[in-house]
Image (tube, coloured by chain):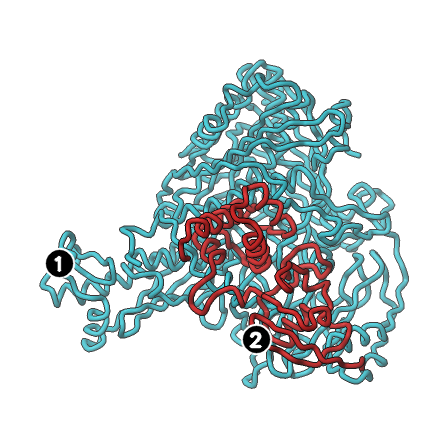
Amino acid sequence: MSRPDSLIGSRMPRIDSGPKVRGEAKFTADIKLPRMLQAAVLRSPHAHAVIKSIDTSAAEKLPGVKAVVTGADTAGVKWGVFRYTQDQQLLPVDRVRYLGEEVAAVAAVSEEAAAEALSLIRVDYKPLPVITDVWQAMAEDAVLLHEDHPNNINVHVDIEVGEVEAGFAASHLVREDVFTAPEESYFMSEPYAVVANPLPDGSLELWMPNAAPHQKAKALCNALKMPLNKVIVRKVTIGGAFGGRSDVFPGEFITALLALKARRPVRLVYTREENTLATRQGHAMYTVVKTGVDKDGLVLARDITCYMDGGAYSSTGPIATSVPFLCMEQTYRLPAVRYNGYRIYTNKPVGGMIRVHGRAFAGGVDLQLDMLAEELGKDPLEVRLLNARRTGDTTPTGSKVQSCGLTDCIKEAGKASGWGDKYKKLPPWRGIGLGTNSVQTGFPLGIRGGSQATIKFNEDGGATVVSGVVDNGQGNDNMLVQIAAEVLGLDPGNIQLISADTEMTANDPGAYSMIATFAGGNAMLAAAEDARRQIFEVAAGAMGANPADLVAAGGKVFVAGSPDHGLPLAKVIRMALIQGRPVMGQGSFTPKVDQRREWLSNPQGQLSETFSFGASIAEVAVDPETGLVELLGLWLAQDCGRALNPMLVEGQFEGGATMGGVGGMLREEHVWTENGRCLNPTFLEYKVPLACDMPAMETIIVESLDPTGPFGAKEAGMSIAMSAAQAISAAVSNAIGKPVFDYPLTPDRVLKAIRGEGGAGE
Amino acid sequence: MAKLQTLAFEVNGEAVELAVRSQETLLEVLRERLELTGSKEGCGEGVCGACTVLVDGAPRRACLTLALEAQGGQVLTVEGLADGAELSLEQQAFVETGAVQCGFCTPGMLLASHDLLSRQEQPDEAAIRQQLSGHICRCTGYAKIVEAVALAADRRAKGEAS
């Protein structure tokens, strides 16, 4: 295959798609090691209880059982993303706080033996009152899940910028509305799994689906009290993340403990139910949005109070409580804004970061602005444009916006969808709606915020590139190779990738904050440019040319304009070896963010170096008798900076609209009993969108060419998941002529909205 | 220990004979005994479609199929689709159209596509979507998978090699 002129912007097939279509890509549960044991976890049948005693003696005596662990083996070691949120014992010692929480675990020679051993473990529980919603949790007499958190308030994000009350006083129109949504789940295709293998040198290697191998290793080395270089997270194929693989779970700690205790490899594979209950879920939300606008619809002030059901532990709480607000303040110009975000402890599984950061937040903000526009007799699309963020702005909490294509996204989506011919002109029970948003590229992560890459060459001219970036399925591996191949003028097939292995790669912040391309891609770009500079120096000497005049393409180095008179790269590499100056590329990239910024104590300063922006439009038909929503079309626009590979970017848009829009806004929700039992933890009852549910989708890539992104790229993974959800709620509201306050928009909720009900919570 | 029975069948054209317990599923035998881990377990209850294989030409959920049900039969898994280095029409189309993201649903999707193309000359989009609706993909939104199946069908109709 001849190499096209530029790989950047090409629809290059992913380097990992061959092994995946052949069924050869190894996921964690596919790993089989000699003498490997099978693990199983005993989980609490109570949503809230004191553990009075645990007796594992019978289980330990069962033939085939090689290790049993309980909280007694752990000294109560706790996990938390931040020092101040370390509230989860990785194996609880004295108390369980949600139904499904880990209590004990075994490793045995077979799954059957492990299951039988679990049945022999005797746990004496004393049940405690169960709290299943934020109102019970905050009540004066409520039992506290964590004694040091009054009213069960886990996190309070408190932000106020500008003169909010003066803004409302000066407003022509003010609305206050309440938007609600229950929990949703990731349902990534691959259920969670861990393999741990103790090595003879005292190190421990682990495989698990993860969104940041280096962060996992650091947390695990703390918990296991081992040096960081002895806890090795290996690369493995990962079956989706969507925010749900971001932090640290008891599963990997338990598997590590069992392996160390048994001195044998151990594999733990979660059932689908365990994956839903014992990893993370999206937060339930109750959001009060108050917005004041002038006569034209320009927002003068906004005040948002959000209560998020955080479940039993903190997890990424301070981040998860902030991000919905941050996406909003990035999207809209706001002279005055106040935010009170409360994350509340309840006896439910742990809330985490999810791709759609708050359907009852983002959807509410957008829909309310539409309501205000309608009252003013304005076109909602025009009002969005009036309030849209622009390049050069600074967000209320102090982030400079260095590139912003939001206005273009809104206009392009409007044009493609035929907004002008449809808004207020559609037949009855048909509607059109717009969602707009913005997404970060990374957060301030201190010493772990930067990414580093290296490149070495073999004597045949091939390269091996090394990066800590992890691929959760979005195509990060391909992104790294595509960038290196472009700069070095190599065929991607001539590049070997080593990545996401904490022993062989240097630090990387991980793929959970939409930063993989921006930081990891920039680091790889720098390493490739460093290598190319060295290559040009050697080649220039041999060719009697000026290094500045050289180009690398097609596996050769030549003077620009004279591709026929170049040196093969292999020859240059060999010359460098003979001359004693071997080519070794190194690069690093640390985003320019304000490291003093902190989620709770100091939510001010540059949050991300750059931000992406997007706008989606949905057209729907609503059946007024059944409340069923039919999607007629989705137009998905995002400013991703630069589409390094449009085929992959389109895939992110389409997948995002499906998960966040069609799933998140129309059907996905968890249902609970008052005892804290989740009634729909599996695919059987929790309905994710299928191929037959999806309408035609038109993807619109807007390229603002970010000044510091690699080749101008920013992020492409999250924006559409949110904006599609926002667009669908706006479209349904437009179709029925009434606001929709409670999500997801299942037929019962749509019928309620048609009757003018909802909006104050249920 | 449960009683062992001899299972003799053909997997991807190879004759296989092994002793299995009566409760072992086809998926367990494929993955754990024959080390054909391309077939995935996404739910273990027949919903997600990631374990789909063809038994005597018909799609089956391997997680809900007892291994002994395949006695004397011919099983095709994702590992049997390619002809050595040469990808099948469906595999090639999945690669070229970007139909693969995380890849966990891909084996089941490919076998569903293979089954459809073996039964229908030129399936339209509705037929493709119906066939794929027994398979859950959380990454792609299905658009590029539908495109891939249509491309493979089109190429086959034109008699193009992959």
The chain carrying label 1 is A
Looking at the rendered structure, which numbered label has been put on residue B14? 2
Q: Name the secondary structure under disc 2.
A: strand
Residue drawn at point x = 81 percent, y = 75 percent:
A116
Residue A221 coordinates in the image, percent (x, y): 59, 71
A490 or A161, which lies in front?
Answer: A490
Residue drawn at point x = 59 percent, y = 19 percent:
A426
As drawn, A570 above or below A675: below
* Whether labels 1 and 2 share one chain: no
Q: Name the secondary structure under disc 1.
A: loop
Looking at the rendered structure, which numbered label has been put on residue A650? none
Residue drawn at point x = 15 percent, y = 62 percent:
A566
Which chain is depicted red?
B
Residue A45 coordinates in the image, percent (x, y): 84, 61
Q: Mark 1 is on which residue type?
A: Asn
Residue drawn at point x = 86 percent, y = 51 percent:
A675
Q: Residue A69's quadrant in the figure?
A: bottom right
Residue B23 coordinates in the image, percent (x, y): 77, 72
Q: Which residue is mark 1?
A: A546
Circles 1 and 2 in contact, beta carbons < 8 Å: no
Q: Mark 2 is on which residue type?
A: Glu
Which chain is depicted cyan?
A
**A341 left or right, relative to A96:** left
